[in-house]
Image: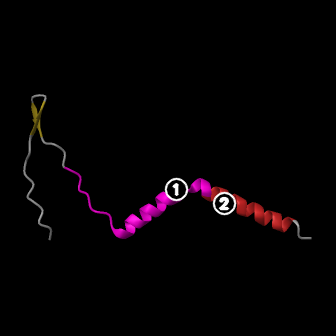
Amino acid sequence: MALDPIPQARLVKQAGQLFAPPPAPKTQPPSQIGQHLKNALNVALGLWPLTGVMLLMLGLLIMAGNGSVK
């Protein structure tokens, strides 16, 4: 059971009117697996031009090798 503080009513005065501010978003620290997956996705998206060129070169090499066989 978490020992979160008891929420209290806060009022903010803006333009002469009182209103309750929106609740702060709850953030959780990312897990290790989630962080590694996010890093892998960032690398894959960041290197997509290089990956595309490498796949194109590999395909051309395979086509060249298959074209000379009779």
> Residue visible at 89% across and 70% down?
69
Element type at mark 2 = helix
**The residue under label 1 is which amino acid type?**
Leu
The residue identified by callout 2 is 54
Reply above or below: 24 against 59: above
Q: Nearer the viewer, residue 25 or 34?
A: 34
Q: Quadrant of the C terminus?
A: bottom right
For this view, does 49 lie left or right of residue 8? right
Q: Quadrant of the N terminus?
A: bottom left
Main SS, magenta residues: helix
Percent across and percent down for residue 27 are: 26, 57
Highlighted magenta segment, given as a residue range: 24-50
Magenta span includes 36: yes
Name the front one of labels 1 and 2: 2
Percent across and percent down for residue 46 are: 52, 54
- In the picture as drawn, the residue positioned furthest to the right comes out as 70
For this view, does 22 lie left or right of residue 31? left
**The residue under label 2 is which amino acid type?**
Met
> Residue visible at 7% across and 51% down?
8
Q: Residues within 10 Å of mark 1 (few under 14, many from 20)?
A: few
Q: CA distance from mark 1 to mark 2?
A: 15 Å
**In the image, which disc is placed on residue 25?**
none
> Residue visible at 35% across and 69% down?
32
**Count of numbered circles in the view:** 2
Magenta span includes 34: yes
The residue identified by callout 1 is 45
The picture quadrant where one finds residue 2 is bottom left
